[in-house]
Each structure stands twice: as structure tokens, then as C-alpha cells.
Amino acid sequence: MENIVIIGNGIAGVSAARHIRKLSDKRIIIVSAETDYFFSRTALMYVYMGHMKFEHTQPYENWFWEKNRIELVNAFVNKVDTENKALTLDGSRTLHYDKLILATGSKPNKFGWPGQDLHGVQGLYSKQDLDMLEVNAPNKEVCKRAVIVGGGLIGIELAEMLRTRDIPVTFLVRENSFWNGVLPEGESQMINEHILEHHIDLRLATNLKEIVSDENGKVKSIIIAETGEELPCDMVGLTAGVTPNMDFLKDSGIELGRGIKVNRYLETNVPDVYAIGDCAEQHEAIGNRRPIEAVWYTGRMMGETVAQTICGNRIEYKPGHWFNSAKFLDIEYQTYGWVFSERGMKDYEAHFHWRHPSEKLCITVAYNKETEQFLGINTFGIRMRHELFDRWLTEERDVNYVIQHLPDANFDPEFYKHHESAILTKYNSDRGTSIKPKKKSIKRIFQLT
Amino acid sequence: MSTYDRSMALTGQPPKEINLNQKIASVVGMLGLAILLLATFNVSFPNKTLWLTLSLASISGGTIWFAWEQYKGKYPGIKNDGVWFKSLTNLGFWGWIAGLAITTFYVILYFFPEYLGLVNGGDNKGVIALFDPLSKALSGNPASQWFVYGALYTVAILVFGIKFMWKYRHNRYERIRTMSVMFFQTSFAFLIPEFMARLNGSSVLQGGSLPFLDLKNIWPLNYYNFESYRIKGFLSSGDIGFAMLVFAILSVFVITPFLTYKFGKRWYCSWVCGCGGLAETIGDPFRQLSDKSVKAWRIERWVIHSVVVFVTLMTTAVIYSYLGNDTSKYWLTKTTFLLGVAALLTLVFAWVMIFKRDQLQKDAKYGAVGYFVIIISLIAIHFFSGEGHVFLFKSGALRKNYSFLIGSIFSGVIGTGFYPIFGNRAWCRFGCPMAAMMGFQQRLFSKFRITTNGGQCISCGNCSTYCEMGIDVRAYAQKGENIVRSSCVGCGICSAVCPRGVLKLENGPLQGRIDSNQVLLGNDVDLMELVNSK
């Protein structure tokens, strides 16, 4: 029987294990030094906020693994010996594999800031980071101010977490508007406003110069590069992105770039070694995607794909239309297809933007200037139906069609106020069109004949 | 320093403390309770109307003020911060104290009403006497322990309903639903029956008197609705009484199935029902305590369906006991009735086994067959054994046991008393026969489902954690599968707490409802077909 060893029990590794089990009787071993059981990384914030206990973040009950004959090993992998197909665990034990799946995820970026390894300085990625946060910032008495460095998704989550315990937060964002490398202007601006509404001290276009230590090697303050201002604080969160977690592979012979290099079949340069999830780097980016995709959904998809390959059905990783989601404090965000920020906009791309006059709701629709083809949508505070946008992208609908049929795509709970007609009015006046709205049709939504 | 504290606040947000106004509000509310408590210990209040008003006003005012302080100035959104840090909502010290206190109240209410001051055939004493003026104003009669209970129950749903609407003020589904339960509790459950009591003996009812009837309280939740004394009451009360009896029967066989087909059982459980109303308002802070394990689900299926069988047998036996044998007097005789029940059950059983067989789990099939055989053979035994009581037991004994075990202990003492222990829907989930029957239909024949939004689920677990019915919502959502579960009461909280907009309660076509579209997890379409081929 073949020995499949998976390093990492995150969504990518666990998806691979589950699908291998569905397809085969191979022996499956998952090695992780982080936790005994799989948990949802994206849910760690809710544990600190008191919405859930840690066990609630575990999608499967503890008996699930034994019942499905997935062996769990809590150990740290020091070394991969690809020649002898063996792993060194915890510096001593050896574990043999026939096929190895690397699903080791990421670690927080550190850009060589002075003081970045002091006590009280941490990222937010792992269960250990969460435990550390309970030590560094259990309440506002111990942590009188926290400084967060890096304006991305994890940064704003960390800010939200700390605010639930009334801890004052200063949020340093390198860009001149929150996440505007990804979000178009109007959206980014709305999130700026919302961050301030939550009494977070948002500092745009601000960089960290240095983290200052007290006499015990603990953070005492930070210094801002632009102004030289010194901000006293008890905790610093480094949330300037993540980078693949692969230090232990340095001498393994596996080709490494920024991540673990894989081909479209998720195979590394070494036979029988695969890499999936955050840690994998495509030789060539797929479509508009980035070569490294540190996203929950892509981890899950790669897990499903590699399971097929390992079970004898060698198959390319071919993700469908791009989609993603996040939540900025109280504002939900969903995206389908591609909407680029001003910085990354394609030459053929144009945007239509609508924002509610008083509530924090907005959408941006991207379309092709020349062909009128619908390219993608960002939506804030309005839920949309994934299935429908996926279908429209496949069918290459034009932007007028999408705007007309928005009522079909609305996924808000029943009785919510609808904004489709306001959106349509703005669209007509922006573009000088006179398209008419279509009524929501159950028949169209569910493709009934 | 520990982040766990002993805050009494239902939704305080540790380690934040409650503010000064909330402390004052708590004192105001406590004063109101103290009046009730003093009355219980037979402190005689001179002006009962005044003191009762004072008491109810300060309980309501204190609670509403507290809630207002909680949510004012907050941005609309999910307000679950610190739920698992508070001892009251995390099975801690205050949780157990609260459970003990409510349980004690129910034991006294059901079994020792004399301690509340109930006097049969004389003037009430204690806290019941305090409510006499209100009862007399409404129905003209002195209060009973049930009147006191009903009044406090209504107050609880109203004031905590207001709190709930503030908590979910960004969510119109929740707000409208809560207004609905507040309305049905106040009017149908509390006021209308009291006013109807005024009609008793009047010419409108042709001198008859109606049994106490909450029109929305449908059999089998209202397990005693077809008992002899009630039928006599209906039939003695002219056209109105007759209409009510017809309505009661139609509710069971026509209205409920129709509405459940259209909207799922939520139309009742979280929009109309009083038990649901209490669970969704004052019980809301405890919803996360329900057990989500597969084991709990298995126990739930056996227990709740056994209650359905129990209530069916009991009601059949009770109706049987007062029917006659002579067809010339009335067309419905003991024999016709029993055969009718047998025929109806056979019909339902056959329909399920023929058309819906493949949608049942193995244990559900065993259970269905087993219970069907038991009921039918009991009916058969009756015909072979001749005259006497049906089902080996006396109908009176069945009735008494049901009312004690299910009607009092399960729905009251455990169902509500254990809110802080088992969560707010323990009765609805494990015990309510009405919920079970509608659930059966919801699972097999209804347009309602919770749609999962393609591949957007991040398996965070908020939906499962806050499901009061203990459904592991995430288990479906993360597979891209719709949620079609008999126990779902459609409260909508899973959808509300989802941070990624994955869940939507909706009524859609039957086609593709259960075997939902799992293809859309975002991966290559060909691969997804492979993954989903079984």
C-alpha cells in the first residue's frame, strides 16, 4: 500500500487527504506541528473576539480522522530527504513516504525592521500566534495601545479583534488609501471611512521605521519613518502580507523560488513530491491570477486536484473563474471575475461604480471598453450569487445584461432593501444608456426549463 | 489575567464592563422582580393595580434601558463579541444558577401552584393575587398560575424582542420576524383567549362556553385540543364554537401542510409559535449552547419522533374513549375513527416509502417501519380483543403520562429551564411533536431550503456555532451543498452571522433542492464532475 504523507493540516492538505480517501485505500498520514486537528484558519479571529471557542473552528469532529483512516502526526518536519524518500521529524524520528504533498502554508512577512523580533511583536497566522496574542494583548490594561503594520486583510482583522477588547489601535498603512493595490478608489475610500468609524487610528501613507525595545527586550514604542514620531505601544502586529513557509526545504533538492515551484499538475521538480496551497508557486501564472495564491479557496481547489493526480488520474490545476470574499469590520466584500484597482487596471478595462448615499454599500463593475464584455464585480455590503456570476462569466455576457439582471444575482436575506434600480439609474446616467431593469426570475436563477 | 468574568449581563462584552447606566437599569429591573418575589412570600400590597404596574414597568423598563445602553452608538452588525467569555452564556457559574432558578420556577408553576398563592374556590394569595386586577380587567375572572405565567411570558417576549431587534437592526428578516412573534404572543396567545372568556355564557355563544383557546396553538403541540371537554365546549358554543373546531382541524390537515410546503416550517416555529418566540427573544443569548455533534443529532431523531408516536397514540386513544358505537347517533364511531386513523397513517407511510425512500437515512427507515408496525398492530389488537381500552393502556393513563412527561417536564422544566445549559431550543429540537411533523414535511416536501452560495464558504463555523437547533450548517456549506434539514426552524441567524455571505434562506423550486449543485466550488468544471460522481 502506498504511503501518502502530507505536510500541513490546513485546508489544502486536508482537502487533499479527504479526496484521496474518497478515491483510494492508500495510507494517508498528515504531519503538522501546529495543532492536532484541522481548524479553519480564517476563523481564528473569532476565537479572540469571543464569538467561538477554538473547538468550534474545527470543521470535523475528532472521531472523523480515525474513521476515515487519516493518520495525524503532531510533529515538526526538519528535513526532507528526497533521495531516500524520508522525512526527519522533531530532529530524530524518520518517516518514510512514497508520495509527498507539501501543504505548509505561509508565514508572516518581516521586512527587516529593527526590533521586529522583540517580545510583543507578532504576526497573525497560526494557532500559536493566536495564543501569543492572548499574552500580548489580553485586555486594555496590559496592552494600552497596539500598532498594526500593514494594511491588508489580516491587518484589518487584527484591528477589529483588538477593538472588541477596547484596546486602542494605530493602523499603519503604506498606501495612501486602504488596500488600494487591490481595490478601486471608491471602495478603498469607503473602507477608510469605515475604519475611522470604528475608532481605529488609521495612518495612511505611513511606514514603520523602527520598533523600540524596553530594558527587558519587550516592545516599548515604534517610530514612524515619515515623521519620526514615536508612538508608545505594548504590542505590534506585523501584517504586511505572508510568504511561503519552506525554510526546511532549503537543501532538499526541491526547486524553490518565492514559493515551492510547481507545474500545472502541482508537481515539483522532484518526482513524487507535490506542493499545494499557499506555499506553491506556479512557474507561470494562470490567467490573471498570481503565481502564488494565498487564498483559502485556491488551497481547497489544489487539494482536490492533487488528489486526482495521486490516485492515478493525472490532471492539471485549472481553477475556474476567480472569486474571493472578505469582511472589513462590518462590511462584507465579495468579488467575482476581475476588477483591478487603478494601479493594476488593464488597458481595455473600464469601471462602473455605484455607492449608496448614506449606507456603507457599493459595487464596482468592470467591463471591456471595446467589446462591452462583463469582466467582474466587487460588491460591498450586498451579497451576490456566486453561481450566477460564474455562469455570466462563462457565457461572456455584456455589461448591460449584467446590470439589467442584477436582481437575479442578489443574495441578501429576504426582506432586505434592494438597490438594483438605483444602480441601474446611475449606470444609465453615467453611460448615457437607457436599459430597463428585468424582474427577478426564479426560472432564470435556477435554470428551470 | 483571565478574560473570563462573572458578568450577569446577557450580552455584555467582556472584558469591557457594563456602564453606570446599565448598572442602574439592572437595579430598576431587579426592583420589579423583587416586588413579584415579595408578593410570592405573601407580602400584601395595598393597591395591587399600582404595584403590579410598577413591577411590570420596572422589569420592562430596566431590561429595555439595559439593552439600549448595550447597542446605542454601535455600528449595525454582528454583536457576538465575548459571548464565550461570559459565565452566563458559556455554561459558567451564572449559567448554572440561571438554569437552576428557571427550572425551580417551572417546577413550582406546574406542580406546586399553591406556593404562588393559588387558592381554589377562594381569594388568591401571593403573586397570583397581585395579578388579579389585570386578569379581571381582561377576562373578568381572577388570575390563575397560568395567567401569571402568560403575562410574564408575554412581557419577556416583548422586552427581549425589542432587545433582539436592536441587536440585529441591520437585518430586516430578523426584525420583521421578531415583530411577528411579538404580535402573535400578545394577541393570539395572551389577549384574545382572555377576551374570549368574556363571551362564555353569552348569547353569542348560545349560552355555551369555549375552552381556553390560543388559535395558533395547533395539535399536536396543543396535545389536549381534541379532548372530550373541549369538543363539548366547542360544540356547545354555537356557530363560533363550531367554526373554531373546524379551524383547529383545518390547521392540522390543511393550513399547516400548505404553509410548510410554501415557506418551510419557519412560518410557524420562528414567526408564530410562542415557544419559538420565547426561545428567539429571551433565549437568544443561549443559542450557541446547542450540541452540534452527530451523536446529538442521532438522539434527536429518535427522541422527537418517539414523541410524535406517543402523541398520536395518546390522542387516538383519548378521542376513541369518548366516541360512541352507534352509527345512527353520529357518523363518527369508535370503529370508523380507528379505521380512519389506520388508513391515514398507512397512506402517509406508503407515500413516503414509495416516493421518498431514497431520501431517508437507514435509521429513519427502521424507525418508520418499526413505529408503523407498532401503531397498526395496536389498532389490530384492539379489533381482535373486542371492547375495552385501546392500545393496551387506559386512555386516561396515556393522557396523564403524556401531559406529565412531555407537556410539563419536557416542554417546560427542561425545555425552558435548561436554556442556559442545552441552549434555547432544546424542546423544539428534541421534544416538540409539531416541529417533528412539520420537519418531516419540510425535509420531504417543501420549497424551503438554505441555499449555499457556491464555493464562498471558509468553514469558519459561525453558522454551526449559532445554530440553535444544533445543525452543523458548515458541514453542508463547505461542500457547496444546500441545507435541507427537518429540524431547521428558519431563524435566519446562520445567514446573519456568516461573514462571507454564503447562506440564504429561500423558497425555491423543488427541482434540485436537496441534491443541490455541488459543482460550483470554483474548480475546473470537468474536475468537479469527477469529484461529485459517486
Image (cartoon, coloured by chain):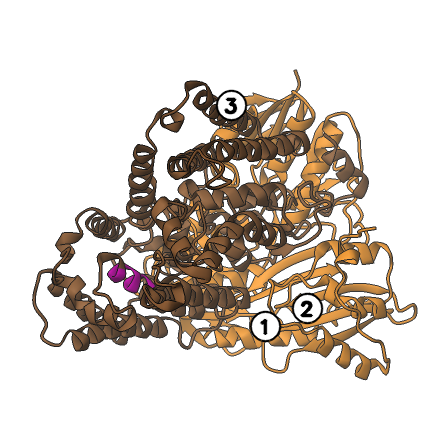
Q: Is residue B153 magenta?
A: yes
* Nearer-the-camera pick, B506 or A71: B506
Q: CA distance from mark 1 to mark 3?
A: 63 Å
* Marker disc for residue A191: 1
Disc nearer the start of the sequence (2/1): 2
Q: Are marks 2 and 3 on the same chain?
A: no
Chain A as rendered: colour: orange
In this rendering, is residue A93 above or below A268? above
* Image quadrant containing the C terminus of chain B: top right
Q: Which mark is residue B373?
A: 3
SS for tag 2?
loop
For residue B158, which quarter of the picture? bottom left
Boundaries of the magenta span: B147-154
Q: CA distance from mark 2 to mark 1?
A: 10 Å
A306 is higher (above) or lower (below) than A162: above
Residue A398, horizontal then vertical, whole percent: 87, 66
Q: Is residue B155 left or right of residue B216?
A: left
Q: Amino acid at mark 3?
A: Val
**Chain identity of mark 3:** B
Q: Residues within 10 Å of mark 3 (few under 14, many from 20)?
A: few
Farthest residue in the left direction? B43
* Spot occupied by residue A2 in the image (x, y as percentages of width and height): 66, 19
Q: Amino acid at mark 2?
A: Leu
Q: Colour of chain B?
A: brown
Q: Nearer the viewer, mark 2 or mark 3?
A: 3
Q: Which residue in the structure is indicated by mark 2?
A: A183
Q: How many marks?
A: 3
Determine the residue positioned at 64% across, 30% down: B357
